[in-house]
Amino acid sequence: KAGVTQTPRYLIKTRGQQVTLSCSPISGHRSVSWYQQTPGQGLQFLFEYFSETQRNKGNFPGRFSGRQFSNSRSEMNVSTLELGDSALYLCASSLVGQGANYGYTFGSGTRLTVV
Amino acid sequence: DAKTTQPNSMESNEEEPVHLPCNHSTISGTDYIHWYRQLPSQGPEYVIHGLTSNVNNRMASLAIAEDRKSSTLILHRATLRDAAVYYCILRDMEYGNKLVFGAGTILRVKS
């Protein structure tokens, strides 16, 4: 069975631009979460979507946004890119949207470099 | 969010068991204990989770202290492919929609 697919794998953008990253969860998984990983801050939660609704949000500025489609695929958008947004962006999907008795499956991430 | 404490790094010899400790003294009754690992250049990978009883799966075993304030991830025979960062995470049963990662433990496996 296919895993969590993130596209693109690598991306280089210029400061001030915006970027959209895509995530296709495992079939049947309706919960999709996004994380940012940097050497300085480690893995940080961005937001979580379930049934097209954002159910939880991390402590990131409004430049970071996301959405989920009816087929559970999700996108995240970062506007007005800053150098500090350079990071590995990871998407994770889960079988159910709430309850802690399930593990998350992560994708391999999108490596974003802002120059 | 409940916090966990793990050693920064550990070293093991190949083919030997590895015991990775985690302290979570502020754990609540509804917190599940989850373990993930991240291999170089990959996203985190789910390893195991438990609530109160010890758990076993094909990857590892999880031993949970009776007072639940600590737990140990056990890799029965470490291989070079087990070299990774291991994260111990507490997830609330009702609001477990996010994972709060700490710094984790870097496991080095020597051949």
Image (cartoon, rainbow, N blue to C red):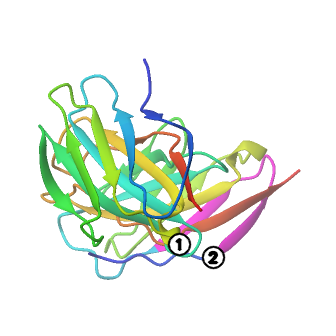
Quadrant hosting residue A96: top left
Please tell me which of labels 2 and 1 falls first in the chain.
2
Disc 2 target residue: B8
Query: Tag 1: Cα neighbours inside 10 Å, few (<14), some, or many (≥20)?
Result: some
Q: Position of residue B57 (x, y in %)?
A: 47, 38
User: Is disc 2 in contact with disc 1, using a CB cutoff of under 8 Å?
Assistant: yes
Identify the residue at the far top of this view.
A1
Disc 2: which chain? B
Disc 2 versus disc 1: distance between alpha carbons? 7 Å
Badge nearest the viewer, 2 or 1: 1
Disc 1 target residue: B103
- Residue depicted at x 34% and y 59%: A79
A30 in relation to A106, above or below: above
B62 horizontally vs A68: left or right: right
Q: Position of residue B95 (x, y in %)?
A: 15, 60
- Residue depicted at x 68% and y 72%: B9
Q: Secondary structure at mark 2?
A: loop
Give the camera-side residue of A74 and A30.
A74
User: Residue A97 in magenta?
Assistant: no
Q: Which residues are magenta?
A: B8-22
Q: Secondary structure at mark 1?
A: loop
